[in-house]
Image (tube, rainbow, N blue to C red):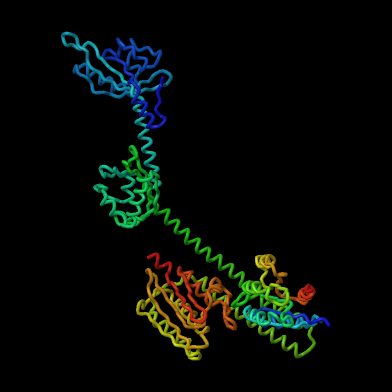
């Protein structure tokens, strides 16, 4: 039996979390959904379960604009610890910004699969899920 | 053969010193009729000009004839030598030559004047050179006046100064001012004078000219900026004279400072624009994209309970957007009203009124606020803005109280380097400025988890302070507390 994918959202926007979860539910795929309100919370979880492949997310969708640690700061910390995690995690950076510099930065950063502009639609989510092998 | 001395003054002089004077001796009647011309006549009158048995006045420039004739008459009548006279010769081919005429009477044995003896010495070279020097001097004077530059020198052995008129004008000294080591030193601060002395010493030692910029106070008490160029002349390896040029660059300096100020203002405006761009894409576009998604979900939903939840989310998004918009438009408002009049503010009273207004929150978290305005009880500032700054900073402190201890906020005013300062120090949560420092005063930045901030407050404080010419600084340590220092300098105050 193929295990459910675990999709984690790192984003401080509660409404966005709510809508993304709803969209995932409507995709007719079995996914587990995790939500972290900021980078520190996400890092705490990932570090705590570094050896537990069952609980580590497969896909991380990280908002760039967050209070406290912003998306890029989180990414730096994450990439530093990457080798400690029991499985490979796909990283997507998202933002409501259409700023080309952020898109370029995401494309240049090794370890980031893509930059996704908000709003995240059902189609975009389906594509992200389909990219995971 | 016509000599010209138009090359340059120095080489013209050299040439003159080595040239033998061209001179002709003439014997002639008082009426100018030439009986005899020495063999040197062609040197003065030019090759091929007949001189003997012509009339001298035919060779003399029309305008100079009367003067020469008077000299001849005088010599003939008084039987004396005339004083030297400079006249022009008009020679063939439009050539003109300057000569100095010396005339004396020639007498016979009985003492009667029989003819006149005149020597004409060609001084064209000297006259050209004189004209050239006058022209050069006038030109350099005009250039110097326009550039506000003056030359000077200092003779090391005699400790004597020479100052040109321009230098005297730059320092606004009276006609009886004599530059000496003491009187010159008095025009500069001791620190600036030391810099000038050091530069001079280096020129004397290395032979490399130096340029320095320094402030000065003129004899009339005006502040000026000078650029001083210093070089030296050497005799067998020893410096004998310090040469220099002094330029008044006050206007240039002033313009530079204005430019700098303008660039600073423009930079602030540009940063602001960028912040607005980022605010729109994050704080406003974020909730907007949520609305779009919620709308899509609503269309597809048939379940009533789910519809209700989506409607709640919709309402919350709209409310959030509305609040953000309101705060942003407040901030923009502040930016626009930059020319509010400053007034004298009783700081303690104003802070008191703000804390009374905030009393409910202060009581709720059990904070204590103390105020020390003993060092600076009054500040001149637009009162609305001052109030706004105090309210924002105190609110900020109240918002980030540390959970483990009662919040203490300390407000203090003082003067530093002539600028009024306000510090607001708290023992709250603090933050890691390494992480957030650069974003702290930006629009739409929030740093604390679960905070209600929209990230507009500190941005607004910065907007006010900067638009009036001051600045705001922050020190903070995570878990210890935060201190904001606001420099309440204003452009108005600078002007007075």
| Quarter of the picture holding the N terminus of chain B | top left
Q: Examine the rendering and report whether any part of residue B294 can be seen.
A: no
Q: Quadrant of residue A107?
A: bottom right
Q: Residue furthest left?
A: B110
Residue B303's place in the image compared with B15, above or below, is: below
Measuring from the top left, give residue B310's x and y in whole percent. 72, 85
| Quarter of the picture holding the C terminus of chain B | bottom left
Residue A42's place in the image compared with B182, above or below, is: below
Measuring from the top left, give residue A29's x and y in whole percent. 81, 81
Measuring from the top left, give residue B362's x and y in whole percent. 48, 88
Residue at position x 45%, y 69% in the image: B470
Between residue B316 and residue A123, name the one nearer to us: A123
Q: Examine the rendering and report whether any part of residue B380 can be seen.
A: yes
Q: Is residue B318 left or right of residue B352?
A: right
Between residue B470 and residue B425, name the one nearer to us: B425
Measuring from the top left, give residue B99's x and y in whole percent. 32, 22
Between residue B89 and residue B481, name the one nearer to us: B481
Residue A115's place in the image compared with B80, above or below, is: below
Q: Residue furthest top?
A: B109
Between residue B470 and residue A13, name the one nearer to us: A13
The mark tally for this picture is 0
């Amino acid at each position: 039996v193929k295990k459910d994918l675990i999709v984690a959202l790192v984003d401080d926007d509660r409404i966005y979390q709510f809508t993304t979860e709803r969209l995932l539910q409507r995709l007719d795929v079995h996914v587990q959904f995790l939500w972290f309100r900021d980078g520190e919370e996400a890092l705490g979880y990932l570090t705590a379960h570094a050896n537990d492949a069952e609980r580590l997310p497969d896909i991380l969708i990280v908002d760039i604009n967050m209070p406290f640690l912003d998306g890029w700061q989180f990414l730096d910390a994450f990439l530093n610890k990457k080798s400690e995690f029991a499985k490979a995690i796909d990283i997507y950076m998202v933002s409501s910004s259409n700023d080309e510099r952020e898109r370029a930065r995401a494309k240049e950063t090794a370890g980031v699969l893509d930059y996704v502009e908000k709003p995240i639609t059902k189609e975009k989510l389906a594509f992200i899920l389909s990219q995971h092998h | 053969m016509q000599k010209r001395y138009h090359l340059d003054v120095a080489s013209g002089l050299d040439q003159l010193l080595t040239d033998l004077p061209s001179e002709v001796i003439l014997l002639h009647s008082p009426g100018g009729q030439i009986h005899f011309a020495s063999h040197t006549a062609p040197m003065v009158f030019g090759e091929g000009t007949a001189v003997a048995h012509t009339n001298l006045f035919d060779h003399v420039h029309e305008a100079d004839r009367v003067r020469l004739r008077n000299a001849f008459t005088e010599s003939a009548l008084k039987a004396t030598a005339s004083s030297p006279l400079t006249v022009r010769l008009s020679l063939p081919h439009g050539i003109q030559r300057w000569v100095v005429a010396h005339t004396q009477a020639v007498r016979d044995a009985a003492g009667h004047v029989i003819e006149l003896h005149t020597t004409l010495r060609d001084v064209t070279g000297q006259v050209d050179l004189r004209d050239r020097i006058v022209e050069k001097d006038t030109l350099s004077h005009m250039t110097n006046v326009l550039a506000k530059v003056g030359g000077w020198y200092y003779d090391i052995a005699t400790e004597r100064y020479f100052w040109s008129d321009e230098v005297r004008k730059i320092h606004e000294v009276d006609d009886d001012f004599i530059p000496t080591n003491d009187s010159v030193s008095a025009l500069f601060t001791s620190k600036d004078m030391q810099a000038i002395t050091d530069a001079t010493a280096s020129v004397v030692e290395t032979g490399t000219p130096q340029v320095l910029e320094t402030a000065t106070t003129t004899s009339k008490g005006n502040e000026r900026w000078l650029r001083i160029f210093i070089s030296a002349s050497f005799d067998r390896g020893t410096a004998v004279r310090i040469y220099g040029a002094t330029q008044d660059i006050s206007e240039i300096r002033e313009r530079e400072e204005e430019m700098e100020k303008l660039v600073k203002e423009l930079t602030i405006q540009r940063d602001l624009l960028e912040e607005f761009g980022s605010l729109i894409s994050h704080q406003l576009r974020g909730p907007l994209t949520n609305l779009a998604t919620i709308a899509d979900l609503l269309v597809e939903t048939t379940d009533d309970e789910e519809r209700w939840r989506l409607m709640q989310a919709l309402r919350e998004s709209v409310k959030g957007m509305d609040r953000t918009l309101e705060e942003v438009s407040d901030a923009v408002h502040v930016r626009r009203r930059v020319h509010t009049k400053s007034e004298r503010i009783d700081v303690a009273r104003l802070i008191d009124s703000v804390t009374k207004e905030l009393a409910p929150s202060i009581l709720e978290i059990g904070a204590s606020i103390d105020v020390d305005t003993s060092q600076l009880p009054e500040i001149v500032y637009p009162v609305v803005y001052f109030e706004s700054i105090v309210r924002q900073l105190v609110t900020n402190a109240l918002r980030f109280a540390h959970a483990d201890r009662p919040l203490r906020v300390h407000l203090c005013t003082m003067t530093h380097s002539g600028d009024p300062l306000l510090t607001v120090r708290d023992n709250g949560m603090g933050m890691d400025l390494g992480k957030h420092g650069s974003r702290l005063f930006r629009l739409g930045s929030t740093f604390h988890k679960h905070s209600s901030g929209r990230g507009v407050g500190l941005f607004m404080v910065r907007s006010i302070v900067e638009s009036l010419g001051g600045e705001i600084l922050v020190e903070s340590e995570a878990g210890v507390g935060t201190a904001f220092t606001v420099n309440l300098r204003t452009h108005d105050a600078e002007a007075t």
